[in-house]
Image (tube, rainbow, N blue to C red):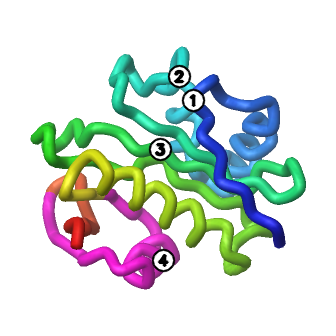
Amino acid sequence: MSLLIANLRDGLPAEFVALRAQAETEGYPFVSRLALRWRDGGYDGDGRATLLGAYDGGALLAVGALTADEYDPHPDHRRIRHFYVLPAARRRGAGRALADALTSEAFRVAPRLHLRATHALSLAFWDAMGFTRVDRPNRTHEKVRP
């Protein structure tokens, strides 16, 4: 697999439609919420948001957003949201590469990163990515810049 992580600042690419459809099929509506909230290169008007996609040979394999944390809006906090990897790309490095890129980007602008994982596999994934589990409302994991 030859992965490329791309900033999707110019909007959701055409390939996003198929990725969103697969997510819906799996019962993950948060990818559709991403489409509703990502407008004009921004996440609900937050000029600091980032949307990244993982590609292999032009195929969009995964997406993830980095935004302000609306549940804990301290300026030193960022949040990974709407992180999704196509089933065929799981356990092949696409998720790890995308998560690493989002984490690096977050730590460029803020020292603390949060997220909420809602499924057993995603909980284990973020554990393996070095995030610490926390028991807080709207947050299952956090990571502090080293």
Task: Indicate whether 126 appears above or below 27.
Answer: below
What is the number of the mark on residue 41?
A: 2
Secondary structure under badge 4? helix
Q: CA distance from mark 1 to mark 2?
A: 5 Å
Q: Is 86 in the magenta?
A: no
What is the number of the mark on residue 125?
A: 4
Tell me the amino acid under the disc marked 3.
Ala
Give the crowd class for mark 1: few <14, some 14-19, many >=20 residues within 10 Å: some
Question: Quarter of the image holding residue 72?
Answer: top left
**Residue 51 at x, y = what percent?**
53, 39
Q: Give the number of marks.
A: 4
Q: Is residue 62 left or right of residue 143?
A: right
Secondary structure under badge 3? strand
Secondary structure under badge 1? loop
Labels 1 and 2 touching (C-beta < 8 A):
yes
Going from N to C along the chain, the mark reached first, 4 or 2, is 2
Instruction: State the extent of the magenta-drawn residues as a range.
Output: 115-136
